[in-house]
Amino acid sequence: METLSTDCGNMHSDIYRTLGLKESRKGVFRSPRVLRLLSSLLDKSVQKNEMLLETTQIKDVVTIFHGLRPPTVSIRDYVDRIFKYSACSPSCFVVAHIYMDRFLQQTDIRLTALNVHRLLITSVMIAAKFVDDAFFNNAYYAKVGGVSTEELNRLEMKFLFSIDFRLQVNVNTFGNYCYQLEKETAGGLQIERPIQACRIKESWSSKDDSTTCSSTISR
C-alpha cells in the first residue's frame, strides 16, 4: 500500500521532518521520539484528571476500560512495550491518540490511571489494523497488553461503537496532532532519542473530519 510522501510541501512537512517521520523502522530497536511525547501528554492528562476528581465532587464514570487498581507499569513503559512487540509503525500511536480523543469526546469518561492502559492497547491495535499493511490478531495484542483475548475483544467492540466506527483520519488532522505532540518539547520535555517510521496512507481523506486535538488534555 502506498504512503503519502512527507516531501509534498504541505503545512506540516516541517513538523514531520522535526519528528523524524520520514525515517524507516527497519533495523531500529530504539524507542521513537513520538512515544516519549505521547507518554508525557497522556501522563499529564491523567495527573490533571485525578487531581480534579480528588478536589471536586465530580465522579468518575466506571467502564469496562477501568481496572480495579492502577497497573504497576508506567504509561511510558507500557507504550514502549506495545511498540517493541506489536511491530506497528509509529504513526499508529498518533492515530491511536486521535482515536482516544474521539472516544473521550463521545463519552463522559476521564483519562485516569485506571483506564489509560486499556484505552492505549485498544486504540493502538485498532490503529494498526487501519493504518499498517500487516498486523497481528487480537490474541497477540492481548498478550502484549497484558489482558485476555476475550477482554480485548470486548474492549475493541465497545471502543468502536463508542466512536461510531469513525476510523478515517485526514492528513490535516494527523498533522495537527503531530503539532500538538511537538508542543510537548516546547513545554520542557527533553528528547534523547529520534522517532522512526511514520506511515500516512495516500487514500486518507483531505476533508475536514471535525476532530480537534486538545480534548485529551482536558478529559
Image (cartoon, helix red, strand yellow):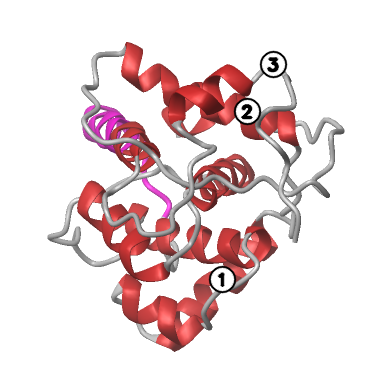
Q: Which residues are magenta?
A: 43-61
Q: Which mark is residue 156?
A: 1
Label 1 element class: helix
Please tell me whether residue 45 belongs to the stretch shown in magenta. yes
Locate residue 50, reporting x and y percent.
26, 37
Q: Which mark is residue 11?
A: 3
Mark 1 vs mark 3: in front: 3
Tell me which label, 1 or 2, sits earlier in the chain: 1
Does 100 sit left or right of 168 as displayed?
left
Q: Residue at x 64, y 21 (%)?
A: 12
Does 76 sit left or right of 177 as displayed?
left
- Are discs 1 and 3 less than 8 Å apart at CB? no
State the separation of the CA atoms marked 1 and 2.
25 Å
- Are discs 1 and 2 less than 8 Å apart at CB? no
Mark 1 vs mark 2: in front: 2
Q: Which mark is residue 175?
A: 2
Amino acid, disc 3 = Met
Please tell me whether residue 105 belongs to the stretch shown in magenta. no
The answer to whether residue 106 is above or below residue 181 is below
Q: Residue at x 12, y 60 (%)?
A: 72
